[in-house]
Image (tube, rainbow, N blue to C red):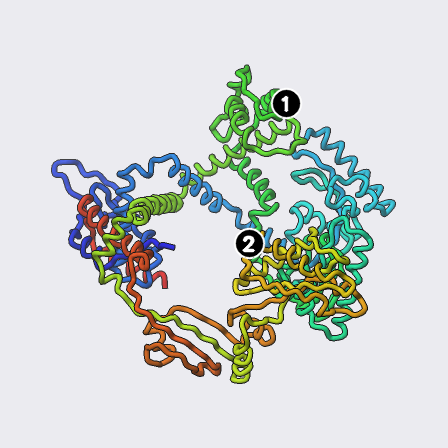
Amino acid sequence: MLYIKYIYAVVLFGILWSCAKPLPSKPIVIQGKPAIIDVPKEPALVTLGEASFTKTDLLAEFENLPSLDSSSNDALINEVIQKKLFIMEAQAMGMDTSSLFKEEVETYKRIEIQNFSEDRAMLSALAEDSYQKYQSEINASHIFIPMSWYASPEDTLKVYNELMELRRYALKNDNFAILAKEWSKDPKTNMKGGSLGWFTAFHLIYPLEKAAYSTPVDSISLPVKTKVGYHLVKVNDKRPNSGYAKVKHIFKYLKVDVSKEQYDKTYATLDSLKTSLESGANFDELVIKYSDDFNSRESNGMLPIFGIGTREESTFEEAAFSLQKGEVSKPVRSSSGLHLIKLIEKYKPDSREVYLKKIQPKLTTDSRAEYLQIKKFETLRKKHHLVINDEIFAQCINYADNRILERNWKMTQNELSNFVLFSIGQNKYFVSAFMKYVEERQEYEKWRTEEKPVEIFKMLFDKYLNQQLVLAEEKSILGTNADLERLFKFQKDNLLYSKFYNKAIIQKSLDDSTGQRQFFESHPELFPNVEVGSFTVVSFADTSIQNKFKVYRAGAKPYQLNRGIKPLYYAKDQYLLGLEEKRKLTGLLTIMKKNSGYIVEIGGHVDKNEDEKVAALRIQQIVDYLVENGLPLTRILEVNYKNNKVQDRFDWTKNQRVSFQFFSNLESDLIKVFNERQAESIIYKTYTIDRREFEKKLGLKWQNQTGVVEIAGRIEEFSLKIKKATKSFNDYKYEVIEKYQDYLTQELTKSLTQKYKVNFDKAELNKIVEAVKSNSK
């Protein structure tokens, strides 16, 4: 990645300092004119042509320099003046007048105003409220009836009364789950009796969360309105927060329509593995051998740390949190299969400090944002004296028809067009403006297919009204806050500078291949030929590990890694691949892709009761599939064991198989095997090293050599191969471009310094820099 360089202190300061002249700081007195009392203006400290900049103009520039603490005063002054020159040139080119640039500036301004007008007290209260809720977990169920937020009062009352009747019936008969199955329209939960499972703060939309936490156990809330409809919430139980869990699992995939026979067989397999674990088997080895979760198998079945309500599968969560450290569960059913879960560790819930920091971004992005928006517009309506002409609005709604559903509604001139629909302060907003908004926005706005034309009109009216309130608030804020105006100007200048620099320096340096090569050839001192070393290190924890590794390394290549994946088993005399077998081979391809040095042995086996030719056919089917999916033949070993390796003398189906073993020509893969037994027993590294780094690290002479040294208690075998690096243009490509950018910047600054006749008061600028540096400490 190429980085924009801002500091060219030595060269550029010489350019700019040659132009430095004292600037007049006293007003010019014109004789014979009556005295006019005026507020003294700040003296200009920098002039560029007709433009001048005061201390106030420049202060923010110095305060926001990333190199403030590491650069000299001259370099910092140089950097700021250079930036001003580039901005002046960008303005002269009209870059600040494009519609795209103006749109970017307005977007930034809108975001900053929104941040400025945020109700910090309310955000703080919401954060604290969520932390208090986070202390406990709720188990709840709900009944959901969909309804538009903009439904008519009659429709709303009808649904509300229906839910109140359901509530009374459920309280009387204790049959909420039965009613949820019959009445709830939530397809995810209705067949589960409306169960939402266990959850804590931020796992439900805010109105439901609020209702759940404010309703006592075994009670049912009053109807709760959300953007999508009405809900009844029944609280089933409450408990302290469970914290977090780290688990490993062995997973067996099951099809959605799995037969009872297959389910029972898979369950029995996992149950037998649990028995083996209780007898001392190694969980990690069983993961490698049996788990169908290819994503976690490489980490021995380890899953990301999770808390209650953070996974789709509540049964998995409950099973995991019910375990003791080191304990393994019975087979646990999920929507995708069966799991054996081993609890590795439990962690306490987040502290208040950690929790509040973690949820800060969520406060304005989850469903609480809707709540904040509602409160915000309630405040703006009062602040800006909003008055809606309800009678006129009611007549506007009559123009809503089915055309809006097809998004081809057209505004027609009518007697309402020139009536005032609402007013904000002294500003009046007419029906015609709203109708035009509807016509323009219908193409982009989203609404549910169940929405009626009248409801869509009401929704668009809300959006239009809120848009005008926001504009009124922006105008109000900008008119009363000079600091914000300065911030906007500063950020606008930054954006313009960035665009100009990208166009004049970055793009030019990247596109001008002729200029790059000429710069390279005319500046040999910047791109010298060097010696570099290819440095390989094998670091051993101790001499015993080193000696064991030597024995393995001395063996024939490819090295056998004693690693593999679970065999594929076949029915008698069968060899064709089905979907299940292909799915498992896809996992093998993933492993081979991740480990570029691996060679896989495909071992064909038959039972003594099978035709021996079947083993070769099984091998060929698998090899063809792997090659078709991108694995080179050079990374496959085909071995026909026929019936020479019996896996089970009693269960003949175990002999009808293809086995998979991994080999490698790379020592680094052999090292991984050692490290599985003892972490970091061997560390392998190979990299390019220069003379200075080598001599500092090893204290040895810079020459081709191999050797063994002891560093920090570890035995390190190393190999150094030196080569003369006569670097070409292509070798230095990125450095050429970076230095070419510096050069272009210097040349452009020279040119613009002459064009805009730079003058500055060095003494005063030094004072500003010193003050800013002092304040930043």
Distance from label 1 to label 2 (Cα)?
Answer: 54 Å
Please tell me whether residue 473 is drawn above or below residue 536 in the rendered image: above
Of pointers 1 and 2, the one earlier in the residue sequence = 1
The three-letter amino acid code for the residue at tag 1 is Asn
**Left or right for 695, reference 526:** right
Q: Quadrant of the N terminus?
A: bottom left
Location of residue 142 (image quadrant)? top right
In the depicted view, which residue is nearer to us: 139 or 8? 8
Relative placement, left or right, of 180 versus 53 is right
Work out which quarter of the rendered image holds the C terminus and state it. Answer: bottom left
* Left or right position of 324 against 541: right
Q: Are marks 1 and 2 in contact (CB under 8 Å)?
A: no
Secondary element at tag 2: loop
Q: Nearer the viewer, residue 43 or 272?
A: 272
Please determine whether, in this image, residue 366 is positioned above or below residue 424. below
The residue lying at 54 percent from left, 57 percent from top is 632
Q: Nearer the viewer, mark 1 or mark 2?
A: 2
* Count of all numbered marks drawn on residues in the image: 2
Could you say which quadrant of the image residue 350 lies in?
bottom right
Residue 535 placement, left or right of 232: left
Q: In the image, residue 101 lies at what x, y percent? A: 38, 39
List x then y, in percent, for residue 237. Answer: 77, 55
**Percent position of residue 29, x then y:** 15, 42
Report helix, strand or loop for mark 1. Answer: helix
Q: Which residue, given by chain and number where applicable, does mark 1 sit on?
A: 402
Q: In the image, what residue type sits under mark 2?
A: Gly
Residue at image mark 2: 630
Q: Position of residue 656 (x, y in %)?
A: 74, 62
Q: Is residue 777 visible?
A: yes
Q: Of residues 691 and 387, which is closer to you in this image?
A: 691
Viewer-side residue, 603 vs 631: 603
